[in-house]
Amino acid sequence: MNAELNSLARRARVHAALGDPARLAIVDALTLGDASPGEIARSLDMPTNLVAHHVRVLTEAGLVVRARSEGDRRRTYLRLRPEALAALAPAPLTGVERVVFVCTHNSARSQLAAALWRHRTHGAAASAGTKPAAQVHPRAVAVARRHRLELDPTRTAHVADVVGDDDLVIAVCDNAHEELTGPVRPRLHWSVPDPVRLDTDEAFEAAYADLADRVDRLAPTVSPGAHHD
């Protein structure tokens, strides 16, 4: 817990340092190359004393480091520390062997999410439902085919028959999130609207796009050990 709080405190300091438009402009200026404080002042049309203040804040937050010029030793160059920006992201999810996506009927959203995860991460994934239907919805099958996803239209399953101890369980509908309060509990909840309610191609495409965006955001946070079949 202490390590987690320390990590949050470090991230908060970085966020605070970036909260000023001038400091954000300095970070932007250093993203692609190094510069001296004087060069920063000229490029941003900012007084040198103000640049010095902002650079001090950025340095204390661990975003910027100073290095003496190997040519003119009187000159100092500023360099951005990209790893400090990368640290703004939440800590990765570790110990995940497989991702299991759950919805009510296991006929659309959870099936598409699992197919997306396998396709985009090459990781192990499965899907299940709290009240599984007899088969996958035809429009979900059609969406998967349009986006070249592998999806078995005849295979649905109950959460009790699928979820294991090391699985990362994600509820992709509100009902499943609210119903699963026993031994199987979702670690994450994606409130994706049920496309079956409208039963149109547009609704299923919207659900696919929502799930694809969420998969892309989650994938980098899952430990590499989960990215295998």
Image (tube, rainbow, N blue to C red):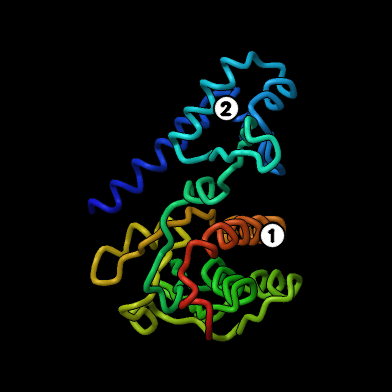
Kind of residue at disc 1:
Glu
Give how far apart the Cα atoms at labels 1 and 2 are: 41 Å
Q: Position of residue 123 (x, y in %)?
A: 54, 78
Q: State the residue at coordinates (68%, 26%).
A: 40
Q: State the residue at coordinates (32%, 62%).
A: 179
Does 170 sit above or below residue 91?
A: below
Q: Secondary structure at mark 1?
A: helix
Q: Quadrant of residue 118?
A: bottom right
Q: Position of residue 208 (x, y in %)?
A: 64, 61
Q: Nearer the viewer, residue 166 or 127?
A: 166
**Residue 205 disc label:** 1
Q: Position of residue 166 (x, y in %)?
A: 34, 77
Q: Secondary structure at mark 2?
A: helix
Q: Nearer the viewer, residue 62 or 89?
A: 62
**Residue 23 disc label:** 2
Q: Is 170 displayed left or right of 220 in the figure?
A: left
Q: Quadrant of residue 168?
A: bottom left
Q: State the residue at coordinates (55%, 38%).
A: 66
Residue 165, visible in the rendered structure: yes
Q: State the residue at coordinates (70%, 69%).
A: 143
Query: Which marked residue is nearer to the observer: mark 1 or mark 2?
Result: 2
Q: Position of residue 129 (x, y in %)?
A: 43, 73
Does 197 sit above or below residue 30?
A: below
Residue 133, visible in the rendered structure: no
Label 1: how many residues lie within 10 Å, few (<14), some (14-19) or many (20+)?
A: some
Does 41 sit above or below residue 129?
A: above
N-term mark: 1 or 2: 2
